[in-house]
Each structure stands twice: as structure tokens, then as C-alpha cells.
């Protein structure tokens, strides 16, 4: 039997020590001004006409942080299985990554998280890509470790499946999240046996994977509660609803809030459960809800048990929401001198489409038809100290104001100055799982989505934050779109469906929106801080071979320009490299650390690292130093990031 907790110590790179001749230092580096607003578009090569009708959008984007030639590049996975490396320094020249001879199964519809070394664990995938239309291959039980340095994939690590095993059982749409001890947990997803002649989605025997398992490379792969068995999923709530993991549940690892943070270094798992879909085989009413698990109990994970949270996300009047594809983040963690949160931990859920509300287009009669059109909501829900009894979900401006636009399929990205960007989405769900043209046998009607083209920004650190609007992006960003923060502080946005009227079809309340209407372009958002004034430069970071939890380390920072003597260091933050698919990056978090600073245009910062892995799970992060800029606009100005490792 495994011990309850294994701390994986990663081997890092040697970070330069902060030693220099301060009597005659070189002049500070001045970062040239960058454009503000959108740049691009940048395009991936277009498929041969007729070769692929609905499988070329970018659905997965992963910022690579492992030291080596590809650090800072983005691994992108298309829905046809092609893989690309995109370099922010040369955005017009994406490099095809799948030219190394691997005979990989499709990685589309996978979950993914970085491990402590910066390798990428890619879990499950899709069984329809690469097979003739209307047919399916064996369902995926695979997972791979991708090494960004060598661009190679490790041998397959099979996922666990329940016993007895139906034929060709597998997974798609699982969630993954890095644990406080460095391992990776996978939960949920969809699964079904492969039945000849049955549809690829929702065949007889289809069900949701209401369970979880843990990956540990030192153990040799995945483990659960017994041979060929995962850990149990969610229990039935006291209200009689059956809660279960479904597609891509929202998972977070969170520390305990004060004063319990010091006594609980393992923290909690917090889940915003995905909704009940048509095709669920449960006999009880399933609702989207929230659940929590204490990771500090003796014998964990073998003793791990989910508890349904007593407070649930509800409509005005009390009816539970049943949300598809909301967005979710942990509000930036502000750490004290002990490296622990100085205030309550807060989780936010934004938007989504509510399947409990009337559809804009009721499903037309006939088998295999789905009207789509569940309306999106503009609510922002927040819960503080969710692990404590009595904590409550709040919305409608109680803590954060609601979005200006209802959004489903939107991406959220945390920025080093404390802002959050919400990008894309649509005002209705349009359920893009069609199997043919409108009215064709087995085909599905789908609503033409109304894209939301204007991003919104919220300062998560402001005492009374208010949403502000940005310039509209060029392309609609709907289902399968991606967005992540780049090391220079800009934001990469790409992929998704277009949500427009296909040519040659009649104007109807519902339309087929999948075929050939996908986005293969990329855009980059350049925030105001990139040209608001001189940017600080991180010259050196101490630590061998990485930054230890609870230790102090130093950062040497150069401030350039006339405002340097007056510029204050506003914050020192760690942000996880993005690993996003289907509008969510499970490991996304921002941590603001306590520090002291010397004076002058060159400053040495002494910084307290996060106390433990529940505050910031071990692995690679982007380190930013942020000044107040001493500008008339008050814009906070971050440095370009340095990659550092917590261990």
C-alpha cells in the first residue's frame, strides 16, 4: 500500500545568484514599448479542402515552462490530432510539432496538467478523429507524459477503468489538477463501450465517469482504490439531488483560510461540478453543484471522501443552477510574512449556460435532434473560505459585479497586475455535436450562436472592482477556444467556432454551425501596461536548484527611466503557466508574495516563498515584479516573467 502523501522533489535549473558589482553596474535594460490592443491575426496552415470539415480549430493550448529550447513556447492541439509549437517571438511561423514519428492516438478532448518537472501529462482523448465519418475507433484509456525539451511522448500510461470492463471502455473530457504534493489528479469525463453501428457519442451504455484517480510517475502510472477501480466520486446531497462528475468538472486545489492555514498544509480539493446532460443514465435528478474534500485526513488518498457543500449556486429564488461551461478562478492569493494566505481564500464562478432555463430553440421532433440554445447568464458567484462551515455562494454584486454580457464558453485569464480578462463566449449554448446536415438521418439542429466580441476586465485586488470593456477581437471565440497569459504579459487568444450562418442554408431558428466554420487563427491582446512606461527588469533570482517552500529568496530588479527613483515595487507574483482547454485551466492561480526592498534604481528584493504546496503546488511558475509605474494613469507595470521552480 502506498503512503498517504508523497512529496515529489523536482530537479530544477540553477538560477543565477544575486551577486554583482554594485559600485559600477551596467545601465538598466529598457524594454521597448509594445503596442496596446490586438495584434494579429496569425494563422495556422489551412487544411486541404474536403480533407477535414469540422476538426481544425485549436482546442488545447499549453504554455511550456520546462527549461530548454522550447521554454516559453505554446503547445497547441487541434481537433484533428495535429500538434503545433507556437513561438511568441515569431508568431507568424507556427511549427508543426507532430513530425517526430510518433503514432499517437488523438489527444483532442484530453485533460492536461504540468508535473513538477514541467513535463505535460495529457490524459485521454477522442476516438472519432482519424476514422471514416460516422465510425469510431477504440475509446481512449491512454495518457502520455510530453517532454517539452525533446518533444517526445512517454510510453502510454493506461487509465484505470472499473471492473468488469465493458468492451473498449475509455474516457474523454476528464479534468486534471496538480495536487499540493506534486502529483496529478484526474476526475470525471465521459465514457461508453464501443458498440458497432452505434453513434460515437451517447451510444447505449453511455455514462459519466463519476470517480477520480491519481497519477504518480514514481509509482508507475495511475492508481485508485483497488485493482482496475477508481476512487469513488460524489455522494447524493441532503437535498435528494445526485451530484456527479461529468464533462470537465471545475477542480481547484486550495489552501485553508486563516487561521486554519498553518495547521493544514495539505489544503482542500474544491469542485464546481459540471451539469446534467441529455443522455445521463442516473435515475435521480442531477444538478451542477459544488463539493469539497479535505486532503489532510489520515490515510489520504485512500480515505478521501467528497462532501457536498451545503451552499450551492442557485437562481434568484433558490432553484439550483445547472450550468454548462461556466468559467472559474481562484482570486489572487495575498500571502503574509509566513507565506500563508493573509485573508480568506475566494473561489469565483462566472457565467455559463443554464440547462434549467427554457431553451431558445426547443428540440425538433425526431431521434438524434437537439435544439441547443440554453441561455447564458451574466452572474458572477463568489464563495469565501469554502472549507469553513457556513460559507455561502454570493452573486448579483454582493462581492463582485456581474458581467456586462451573458457568456457561455468564455475564457478567463489572470494578469500580473491583478486584473482578470474574460474573453469570448456567446449568449446561448449551441451544443456543437452534430452528426450531419440539418434534417439528415442522425443529424442535429444547432442554434447559431450569438458571439460576444468584447472582452471584459476586472481588477480582482481593487476594494470596489468594476468591469471595464476592451476593444473587440477580430474572430468569435466560442466552443473550443483558448486563452492564456504569455511571459511578456500579453494574452494569446485562439480557436473556437465562428457561430455564423453557413452559406446555402435557409434562415431558420436553428442551424448547423459545425462544418467548416471553425477558427484556425490566433490573436494577441497587449494590455495597457505594456506601453504605460518603463518596465522593471528581473536581472537575477537566487535559489539552488529551485525555490523551497517557506524559504526566503532574493530578486535583483533594475528600474529604468526618469520615474525609476520614485517607482514603488507594487508586488511580486507567481502565476502558473496556462494549460487550457474548453475554456478552463484547472491549475490557474496567482500568488502575491510578501517582500522587502532596498532603495535605488537597482533594488534587491527579499521575498518569502509560499509556505507549502496547498498555497502553490510544486512546479514551474512565471515570476513577475510589478511596479506602480509612477504614471499619471496609475497603471501597474509588470516585468517580463522569469520562469522559476517551487519545490
Image (cartoon, rainbow, N blue to C red):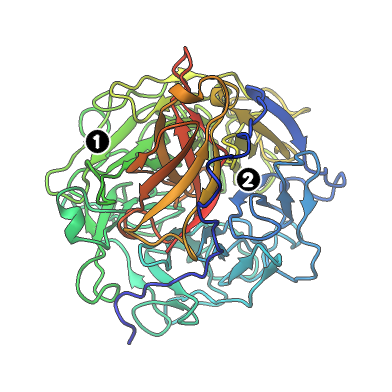
- The structure residue drawn at horizontal position 35% and vertical position 62%, both measured from the top left corner, is 180
Q: Residues within 10 Å of mark 1 (few under 14, many from 20)?
A: few
Q: Earlier in the sequence, mark 1 or mark 2?
A: 1
- Most extreme residue toward the front, as rendered? 23
In the picture, measured across the screen, residue 399 lies left or right of residue 73, that is left
Q: Give x and y (percent) for residue 191.
A: 50, 64
Q: Secondary structure at mark 1?
A: loop
Q: Give x and y (percent) for residue 146.
A: 63, 66
Mark 1 vs mark 2: give the one in front.
Answer: 1
In the picture, measured across the screen, residue 503 lies left or right of residue 176, that is right
Per the model, the C-alpha gap separating discs 1 and 2 is 30 Å
Give above or below for 125 relative to 405.
below
Q: Give x and y (percent) for residue 86.
A: 72, 47
Q: Residues within 10 Å of mark 2 (few under 14, many from 20)?
A: many
Is residue 120 at all visible to an observer of this figure? no
Q: Which residue is label 1 attached to?
A: 319
Q: Return the residue nearer the eye: 11 or 352.
A: 11
Q: Return the residue nearer the eye: 273 or 485.
A: 485
Are discs 1 and 2 less than 8 Å apart at CB?
no
Give above or below for 630 relative to 362.
above
Is residue 380 at all visible to an observer of this figure? yes
- Most extreme residue toward the right, as rendered? 48
Is the N terminus in the top left, top right, bottom left or bottom right quadrant?
Answer: bottom left
In the picture, measured across the screen, residue 148 lies left or right of residue 266, that is right
- The structure residue drawn at horizontal position 67% and vertical position 45%, both measured from the top left corner, is 58
Q: Which residue is label 2 attached to?
A: 434
Task: Find residue 352 and report its image quarter.
Answer: top left
- Most extreme residue toward the left, as rendered? 390
Q: Return the residue nearer the eye: 461 or 16.
A: 16
Q: Secondary structure at mark 2?
A: loop
Amino acid at each position: 500500500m502506498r503512503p498517504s502523501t508523497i512529496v515529489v522533489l523536482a530537479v530544477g535549473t540553477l538560477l543565477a545568484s544575486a551577486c554583482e558589482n554594485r559600485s559600477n553596474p551596467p545601465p538598466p535594460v529598457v524594454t521597448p514599448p509594445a503596442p496596446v490592443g490586438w495584434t494579429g491575426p496569425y494563422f495556422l496552415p489551412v487544411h486541404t479542402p474536403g480533407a477535414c470539415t469540422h476538426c481544425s480549430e485549436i482546442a488545447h493550448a499549453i504554455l511550456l515552462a520546462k527549461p530548454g529550447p522550447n521554454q516559453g513556447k505554446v503547445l497547441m492541439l487541434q481537433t484533428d490530432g495535429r500538434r503545433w509549437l507556437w513561438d511568441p517571438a515569431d508568431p507568424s511561423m507556427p511549427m508543426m510539432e507532430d513530425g517526430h514519428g510518433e503514432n499517437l492516438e488523438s489527444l483532442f478532448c484530453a485533460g492536461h496538467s504540468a508535473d513538477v518537472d514541467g513535463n505535460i501529462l495529457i490524459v485521454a482523448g477522442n476516438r472519432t478523429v482519424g476514422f471514416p465519418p460516422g465510425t469510431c475507433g477504440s475509446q481512449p484509456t491512454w495518457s502520455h507524459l510530453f517532454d517539452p525539451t525533446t518533444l517526445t511522448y512517454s510510453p502510454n500510461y493506461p487509465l484505470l477503468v472499473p471492473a468488469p470492463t465493458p468492451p473498449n471502455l475509455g474516457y474523454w473530457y476528464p479534468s486534471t489538477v496538480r495536487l499540493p504534493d506534486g502529483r496529478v489528479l484526474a476526475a470525471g469525463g465521459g465514457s461508453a463501450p464501443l458498440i458497432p453501428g452505434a453513434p460515437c457519442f451517447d451510444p447505449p451504455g453511455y455514462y459519466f465517469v463519476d470517480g477520480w484517480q491519481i497519477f504518480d510517475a514514481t509509482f508507475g502510472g495511475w492508481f485508485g482504490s483497488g485493482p482496475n477501480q477508481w476512487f469513488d466520486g460524489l455522494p447524493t446531497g441532503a437535498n435528494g439531488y445526485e451530484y456527479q462528475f461529468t464533462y470537465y468538472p471545475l477542480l481547484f486545489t486550495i489552501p485553508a483560510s486563516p487561521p486554519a492555514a498553518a495547521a493544514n498544509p495539505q489544503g482542500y480539493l474544491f469542485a464546481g461540478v459540471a451539469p446534467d446532460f441529455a443522455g445521463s443514465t442516473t435515475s435521480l435528478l442531477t444538478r451542477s453543484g459544488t463539493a469539497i474534500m479535505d486532503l489532510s485526513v489520515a490515510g489520504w488518498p485512500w480515505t478521501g471522501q467528497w462532501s457536498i457543500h451545503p451552499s450551492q449556486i442557485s437562481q434568484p429564488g433558490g432553484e439550483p443552477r445547472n450550468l454548462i461551461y461556466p468559467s472559474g478562478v481562484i482570486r489572487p492569493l495575498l500571502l503574509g510574512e509566513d507565506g500563508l494566505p493573509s485573508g480568506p481564500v475566494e473561489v469565483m464562478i462566472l457565467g455559463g449556460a443554464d440547462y434549467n432555463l427554457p431553451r431558445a430553440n426547443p428540440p425538433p421532433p425526431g431521434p438524434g435532434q437537439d435544439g441547443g440554445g440554453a441561455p447564458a447568464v451574466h452572474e458572477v458567484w463568489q464563495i469565501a473560505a469554502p472549507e469553513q462551515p457556513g460559507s455561502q455562494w454570493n452573486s448579483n454584486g454582493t462581492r463582485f459585479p456581474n458581467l456586462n454580457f451573458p457568456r457561455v464558453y468564455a475564457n478567463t485569464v489572470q494578469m500580473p497586475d491583478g486584473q482578470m480578462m474574460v474573453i469570448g463566449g456567446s449568449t446561448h449554448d449551441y451544443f456543437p455535436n452534430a452528426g450531419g446536415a440539418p434534417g439528415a438521418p442522425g443529424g442535429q439542429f444547432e442554434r447559431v450562436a450569438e458571439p460576444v466580441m468584447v472582452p471584459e476586465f476586472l481588477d480582482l485586488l481593487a476594494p470596489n472592482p468594476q468591469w471595464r470593456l476592451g476593444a473587440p477581437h477580430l474572430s468569435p471565440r466560442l466552443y473550443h477556444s483558448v486563452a492564456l497569459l504569455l511571459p511578456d504579459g500579453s494574452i494569446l487568444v485562439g480557436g473556437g467556432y465562428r457561430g455564423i450562418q453557413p452559406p446555402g442554408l435557409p434562415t431558420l431558428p436553428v442551424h448547423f454551425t459545425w462544418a467548416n466554420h471553425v477558427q484556425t487563427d490566433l490573436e494577441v491582446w497587449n494590455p495597457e501596461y505594456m506601453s504605460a512606461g518603463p518596465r522593471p527588469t528581473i536581472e537575477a533570482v537566487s535559489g539552488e536548484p529551485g525555490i523551497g517552500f517557506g524559504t526566503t529568496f532574493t530578486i535583483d530588479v533594475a528600474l529604468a527611466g526618469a520615474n525609476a527613483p520614485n517607482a514603488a515595487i507594487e508586488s511580486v507574483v507567481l502565476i502558473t503557466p496556462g494549460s487550457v482547454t474548453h475554456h478552463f485551466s484547472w491549475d490557474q492561480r496567482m500568488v502575491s508574495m510578501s517582500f522587502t526592498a532596498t532603495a535605488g534604481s537597482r533594488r534587491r528584493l527579499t521575498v518569502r516563498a509560499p509556505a507549502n504546496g496547498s498555497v502553490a503546488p510544486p512546479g514551474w511558475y512565471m515570476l513577475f515584479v510589478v511596479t506602480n509605474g509612477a504614471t499619471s494613469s496609475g497603471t501597474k507595470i509588470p516585468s517580463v516573467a522569469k520562469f522559476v521552480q517551487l519545490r
